Image (cartoon, rainbow, N blue to C red):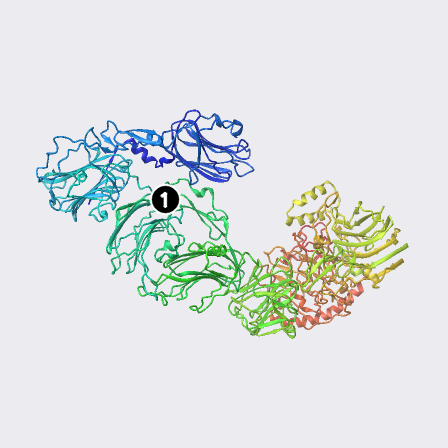
Amino acid sequence: MMTRKWRCVKLSPAFVWLGLVVLSVTTALEFDGLPGQWVRYGPWEAGATGELSFTMKTNISKAIVLYLDDGGNCDFLELLINDGRLQLRFAIHCGEPASLHMETHISDERWHRVLLTRNYRETMLVMDGESKVAEVKSKRREMMVASDLYVGGIPPDVRLSALTSSTVKYEPPFRGLIANLKLGETAPALLDSQGVKNDLDYLCTKQNPCSNGGRCSIQGSEVLCDCSNTGYKGKYCTEVLQQVLGGLAHLTLKSQAPGAAPLMATPAAGDPKSGQVESVATFKGNEFFSYDLSQKPIQSSTDEITLSFRTLQRNGLLLHTGKSADYVNLSLKSGAVCLVINLGSGAFEALVEPSDGKFNDNAWHAVRVSRNLRQRAGVGLPTVNKLHYMVTISVDGLLTTTGYTQEDYTMLGSDDFFYVGGSPNTADLPGSPVSNNFMGCLKDVVYTNNEFRLELSHLAELRDPKVTLHGDLTFRCEDVAALDPVSFDAPTAYVTLPRWNGKKAGSVSFDFRTTEPNGLLLFSHGRPQGSKDHRPRVDFFAMELLDGFLHLLMDMGSGSIKIKVGNKKVNDGEWCHVDFQREGRKGSISVNGRSLPFSTNEGSEILDLDGEMYLGGLPENSGDLSLPPEVWTARLRLGFVGCVRDLFVDGRSKDLRRLAELQSAPGVSSFCTRETHRRCSSEPCVHGGRCREGWNRHVCDCTGTGYMGPNCEMESAVLSYDGSMFLKVLMPHAAHSEAEDVSLRFMSQRAYGLLMATTSKESADTLRLELDGGRVKLTVNLDCIGIDCNLISTGKGPETLFAGHKLNDNEWHSVKVVRRGKSLQLSVDNVTVEGQMSGAHTQLEFHHIETGIMTERRFISVMPSNFIGHLQGLSFNGMPYLDQCKNGDISYCELNARFGMRRIVADPVSFRNRASYVALSTLQAYASMHLFFQFKTTSPDGLILFNSGDGSDFIVIELVKGYIHYVFDLGNGPSLMKGNSDKPLNDNQWHNVMVSRDDSNVHTLKIDSRTVTQHSNGARNLDLKGELYIGGVGKSMYNSLPKLIASRDGYQGCPASVDLNGRLSDLIADALHRVGQVERGCEAGPGTTCTEDSCSNQGVCLQQWEGFTCDCTMTTYGGPLCSDPGTTYIFGRGGALITYTWAPNDRPSTRADRLAVGFSTQQSDAILVQVESSQGLGDYLQLHIEQGKVGVIFNVGTDDITIDEPAVTVNDGKYHVVRFTRSGGNATLQVDNQPVIERFPSGNIDNERLAIARQRIPYRLGRVVDEWLLDKGRQLTIFNSQAAIKVGGQDKGRPFQGQISGLYYNGLQVLKLAAEGDPNVQVAGNLRLVGDAPSVLSTETTSATPPAAADMSTTIMETTTTMATTTTRRQRSPSLKDSITQNSDDLLVASAECPSDDEDLEECEPGTGGELVLPIITVDTQDPISMATRYPAIPAPPTSLTPLQTTKESLILSDPRPPCPPDQEDCGDPMEVSAFGSGEMTESDDEDFNRNSPMVTDRTVLPPPPGVGKSGHGDHRPPVPAPTTHPNQLHIPAGKMNTRDQVLLPPVPSSRHTPGLTYPPDFPHVPTAHPTDLMEKGRPGAVEVIRESSSTTGMVVDIVAAAALCILILLYAMYKYRNRDEGSYQVDQSRNSGSESNGAVVKEKTPSTTAAVAKTTTKGKKDKDKEYYV
């Protein structure tokens, strides 16, 4: 085949204009640029966002284009032409106007497209390919729009004061054309205009409809054509005047028989002359005529064809004759003239097209085709020249191309028909490059050869017998509207076409353009056929775009075919021509001229399409359609978005624009433009949606965002599942698909559970998503057993993919599944895993889509676990089923899951008392395990889960002091992991606990959202046996529990959602046996809960499981609700004195003090309370009345610090309550409910500056600054060696007279002790007790008054130092609840007496050996990275026991142990080795213990004192006079010795203080009555892991025996030296560099021989490490 193209250089102006812009003439306005012209449209509502577009053409260099404002206030927008370029100015909220200037000239008399896009403060201007954005700086985002939209000028009736822009009215009016003005996608409402020509004016002047030289005019809003002197008539001068020309009727062809058609002389086309006769006909796509050549076939060697055409159509058959391999075909192809000639030896093809523009410009064009015999010689030819036939084709006499036909065949033989303007089936004509008929006007079609001349047009007009007319052929030239393209703006848009009756043969051709990769172009199907037992089959025909490639799909009843047409993507935004032709089982499909033949399966040759044909998409409710699974875009609801034009079915045109208008098709518009600007540049997708560019639109992918809608602006529905809930979507009928898109979000604490599954009633087909071990598991099973698989091989079996890791973290995770036939993709949080299915079967059948619980169980062997958590945004093939079920959009939903983010508590059970528990079957945790449960309680301790095993294997989960402990033994010795929750969990709120162990022996403990992990070496299997206990064990079993288990009682509270390795356990139904009060549900927890007025007089309410207690310590009141008067004494005339005296060895040193007292008096001067230090120190604290005002003066170093309340007069005889707190040098004072007075220590100007700067110092550096200040001696904070509390002031000469009640000081209730006759209290003077002393401690479960634990703890308090020189008053009066956290600050330090301040940094040596050195250290473990050693706090002793009575007599500390402060977990803890979440195990073996170390560098454990009752309150125990040895006492040897030099480091800031107690390695271990208290929880923030080797048993026995002997010796030594001064020591703890002290500065002592303490020699040594007090 030979193909030739000829491109013309010269082109008429009409080509240029029509080629530049395609616009609708119905929206054009012509502006003359005269003063007073304007057009007014309705307002453009673009305050926030909006688009305005138009096309314009002008030659003016300065003018106004459009304008709008807010009515003369602040906001305006104007578009001007300035210097031949567009200029945009706008302003919002009276801000500085923003402006931008385009670079491209617009005053060039060319058409330009302009687009304005508003986006809050930004406005973008796009002109052709240039775009610019400007942003206005304003407080308000939205532009206020109050005016109409003015175009081309401003109406004169608009006052200048009503215009925001003062210059716009003086801008020159616009001159030129403006067309296609649109606001968004719709035309604005035209309100009024002046001096502007309307659409008809534009039509008459710029696109004259009058043909053949007719003159156009407008009269009465109609176009009139004056045809005089043109030789034509009719509305548009297209009808030829019928004038008989003499002398022509007798002319005939030399071979013409009588009666044949006369010869008609035809002048050159395009050069009409007056009076000349032309034969013109109008073809509209369904019309054509044929001339029968069967009686006289053509046999010619020289011939010529001439014709003229006028059309707007790009493709169409002009003329054809011949068949088989002997034919001539002349057509319009893509706006060019195409000639194809075949004389039996191959086709010759010539294509003539202009270099710019096309021939379908609605102008007349003359075509001449000639074939002549010529002699041809050239290179490669024989020496003897042969005769060849040269073919010449010319258009308008200018465009000519020449070629030669093949040598062997020179004669054109045709015994068929001459087809003009079309044929019955143009696609089947041999060699036809097009498949559709011509649309337009044809005239003077003449065929001439060497024997005769056929004037075919004239013969048709005369109705010659050999001519057959088809369709409504009109013999005049009428305008034939072009087949306007239509745009499908959204995937839901479609146009319905009539049924296609192409049973045996047929053709379809059309053009399309798009930039989107997927979309359904055409679809039609037949009537379902098949038996009831199998899925019915239907004939169908479809074309779709998949990943940018065109696919043809057909099924004629013998099996479907799917053909990918070409290897080049066609979504490049350019027009693509598609031509489909079929005859029987064979056919071809071509894309842009590249043809691909095809053949359907053996069998039927009939394509039986019973239904309508859909173009661009399918109806939204396509349930009645039989959608074949092979058509993926139909199942995925991916409609076509783009443009389609020139649709011909079986050669007949389809007016898509008219069809769309008749059907009112939403989303279908009658034009096609391609926008140049990028929609995503304005970031239209909100809430994290991902934007991609589409065809004139943006596409937001909302997967994983929790939102839906075009811009991800609507929140998706959330469904909550508690393990018994589900949502099930029932399909109206069985669905079959080969492609699925599934997306959802989920949030769960469980590692197992069904997310989504498709299920079938007839087969095992399923597509299932589930959580499996914290990962997402995708299972796809395509089963052929229950469905018709006769035509294809059976499927293989389930395919599985896994993605994600540790997804059970109660965070949102997004899941997406994409299946295309055998290809699988699973994405979790944008991480994608791909897989490929085996087997030929690819169809998935399903009747239901299920979530939460899989109810269809007939074809599944292993059921997935029920889901507990939240689901959101489930979309299956584009259907948002969760939201549709919620909104009632679909009626086939079954559900009991609850909409909304609800607290999920599944199967809660109440353990009413500590003796209740249930026993389940053995926990299967040999190689790995995953446990999850929820709990709610107010009890701080209790055994939650226990399962023993083979040998020493066991697992325990328990609650210790409000924190979760996980203890296990895999055969390497027991290990302990502590949760790092930020506060105790016994707060009567639900908490989530997850414990897991994977195949790599990594243990994970997660409490709510805080996770710790640990890797253990050695044994990897947990061999459990026996029953699994939940809630506790039998009473007799506690003493035999493994070591490291602290619990000695059961759990009281509610567990729920118990998940044992993926199985939801029903604790009551699954229990092997049940003990105690175990009931379903968790009604309300405590019967009585705390409220704001639960406790009177600012008492603090403490919630308990069965009620609450009140902390009345700082109220001066007592009783269960702090409503009873405290112990009250009347101080009579002459005064009295109550003195509480500490034993010399028990005198505390404090960094913080808390004092509360109530009184009534009429004295204006008296001392209420005075606290004194040991003789010679000079520290004191005094509360007094002076001039009727309350004041406090204290000295903890060198200067007296005072604070008073000048606003309240207290000598009025009324009852007043005074509350005083001290923290270092800072102090607060509150009288009654007055605002709190704050006092900071005074200093020089540097201190004042530091007080201000200190607030901006980072917290971690704050304590370093404090330490530096301490070194400089600027601030002294320790109240050293407190010796006595004196009440009444008699000894100072300022006696008090009146009543004093409820005195409280640092945990001591002095008046109550006096009333009880405590031996440490002496009374003197005129003193009388009022009534019986009320009890301030209660053992009732509903309320109690606990002593302040933190106030009695013998540690140094951490303070935050703030300095100023003034006294300030707070603006509110905080209750005691506001300052309850201060309890954690009032920590005491036991200190030996020393003649001078311990802050003086001078050496003090009260003794020379023989003393018992008990270093008390403070450790900060805030940093969760490094390894550190942790120390216990010494719990508060009761008020009847001196703080360090243990050093004097027994070392057995009695333990009323009130609750620890909420933020301090470690009070009362033993020492523990912590791995801080690093997963590293720290082991301690006997051989590591060096009892002969010369340095005190290791630590052993001093257990905390035993508790008194379960609540920590009750009567005080008397001290045990002698030590005893408990057989179950646990001793943990210290780690390896470290003898590094002392390094004193500055303390690291911490939000709370964690004290500890350390012994020398030689110091004996003293057993206590409750050895299990050893394992109490450390403070949050650290994961504590304790390992105990079973090999240390013998060494422990030796140590216990040695300890008893050492204690006796040391007690004797203490007795001898108890009254001597004892110094404070510093001990090297450099091996614990991660834990710095926050204690006070102490002196460096010469080490005693017993303590083996290293001496330091410098006074001002920096970088102090630890500080200890004895």
Quarter of the image that includes the C terminus: bottom right
* For residue 1205, above or below residue 1610: above
Q: In which quarter of the image is residue 678?
A: top left
Q: Can residue 1436 be seen in this snapshot?
A: yes
In the image as oriented, which residue stretches furthest toward the front? 220
Residue 1562 lies left or right of residue 650; in this view the side is: right
Q: Residue 186 at what x, y percent from top left?
A: 42, 40
Please tell me how crowded label 1 is: few (under 14), some (14-19), or many (20+) other residues with Cα within 10 Å.
some
Q: What element carries label 1?
A: helix
Q: Which amino acid does label 1 sit on?
A: Glu
Residue 313 lies left or right of residue 191; in this view the side is: left
Number of callouts: 1
Q: Can residue 1538 be seen in this snapshot?
A: no
Quarter of the image that includes the N terminus: top left
Q: Residue 1213 at what x, y percent from top left?
A: 85, 51
Residue at image x 55%, y 36%? 138
Nearer to the camera, 708 or 1013: 708
Q: Residue 1571 at what x, y percent from top left?
A: 68, 69
* For residue 1506, above or below residue 709: below
Q: Circle 1 is placed at which residue position?
A: 661
Q: Quadrant of residue 445?
A: top left
Nearer to the camera, 1526 or 1062: 1062
Q: In which quarter of the image is residue 483?
A: top left
Q: Residue 523 at what x, y percent from top left?
A: 33, 52
In the image as oriented, which residue stretches furthest toward the right? 1134
